[in-house]
Amino acid sequence: MNDKTKNVVVTIVFLFVIIIMLIANIIKKDTPISLAERRKLQQFPRFSIEELLKGSFFEKFEKYTMDQFVQRETFRTLKANIEMKVLKKQDSNNIYEYHKRLVEQIYPLNEKSVENITKKMNEINQRYLKQTNKIYYTIVPDKNYFVNDNHLKLDYQKLQDKMKENLQWANYINIFDCLDLFCYYATDSHWKQEKLQKVVDRIDANMNLNLEGNYEEKKIVDFKGVYAGQLPITIDNDEIRVLTNQIIENSMVYNHETNQKTKIYNIEKVNAPDKYDIYLSGATPLLTIENPQGNKEKELIVFRDSYGSSLIPLLVEGYHKITVIDTRYISPKILEKYVEFENKEILFVYSTLLINNSTSLK
């Protein structure tokens, strides 16, 4: 076959592939969400002359074609594997692989964000808390803290120092040395509940809870975490495991938003896109946990982000009632309508991920 014939054949094959892909994309039904990326996908944009003249129609259409491309997940996986394994890039979209675990490179320290979160904590203190409250806070390090490699990191010491400087009215419980990289899911940012005993022991020692900590460990479901969607390379599944006992089984959770009662572990969430929602039903503005076997004189109020969902069940034994507040979803200014703060113990549980990007707090 001469060069001219080869060129013709290659051109025909190329055009054939393009036409087939075009037809496939036309007949393909649009996908509403990406389970891997945990986000809604762009749908076909509404056409109008105004949108066309502003140029916004074509911007949305471009996003639509990128989101709805046929075999999109296959191409995302191929791209990520080529970048990481062939081109030897250290990371893709700030996610990298280390010891068969996916880690987000968090950098640099956002000092304005640290100031913002401590300002909001100070406002809560000034508005609601008194000398009758015993007040504590702890900081959950992200996975990047535990990687001894050439990846960029936050200045974790400076972060802790600034928090201490701005929160002198609260007792700091340092749990950094209670954790390591393998206390976290391989494909997700969160920590594993079954690896939190040292953290619970540290909190117990500081808050004098006298927890027995006798649990049965149960596997609930396999899952792929959020990082598996952001860096789609081959990584083994994680497992959602829960620690339970008679006290946890007998306790009930009241959701103030839905007016519903559930168990501490909401097993219905095995079908949710994010199976970490099994712990306390996931992101929720305001919860009340009641332990009928707990000391009626002891109540706790926890201000938390998502890391608190799997930690708080392990503190239930120490209290008759725990109120769980997530100020990403409820304004602190209206808490007095729902929460009585007098004589309660207070615990703030925030991760470095939130502290370094606290704009979501109300």
Image (tube, rainbow, N blue to C red):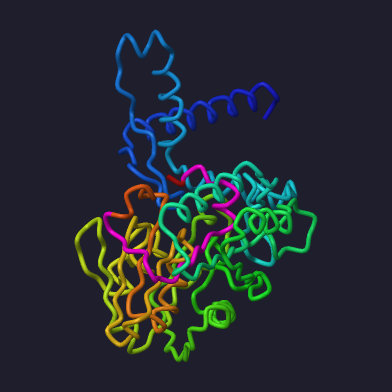
Left or right of 341, for residue 171: right
| Range shown magenta | 337-360
At 27% from the left and 58% from the top, the residue drawn is 338
Q: Is residue 144 above or below residue 71?
A: below
Q: Is residue 85 above or below residue 348?
A: above
Left or right of 213, for residue 90: right
Q: Nearer the viewer, residue 32 or 3?
A: 32
For residue 196, what is the image quadrant? bottom right
On the image, the x and y values in percent for residue 330 come to 35, 50
At 44% from the left and 60% from the top, the residue drawn is 129
Q: Is residue 109 above or below residue 283?
A: above
Q: Residue furthest left?
A: 259
Q: Nearer the viewer, residue 120 or 61?
A: 120
Look at the image and tell me in which quarter the C terminus lies: top left
Q: Nearer the viewer, residue 216 or 213?
A: 213
Q: Residue furthest front?
A: 131
At 32% from the left and 38% from the top, the residue drawn is 30
Look at the image and tell me in which quarter the N terminus lies: top right
On the image, the x and y values in percent for residue 278 come to 36, 68
In this rendering, the count of numbered labels is 0
Residue 212 in magenta stretch: no
On the image, the x and y values in percent for residue 147 come to 72, 63
On the image, the x and y values in percent for residue 21 come to 44, 33
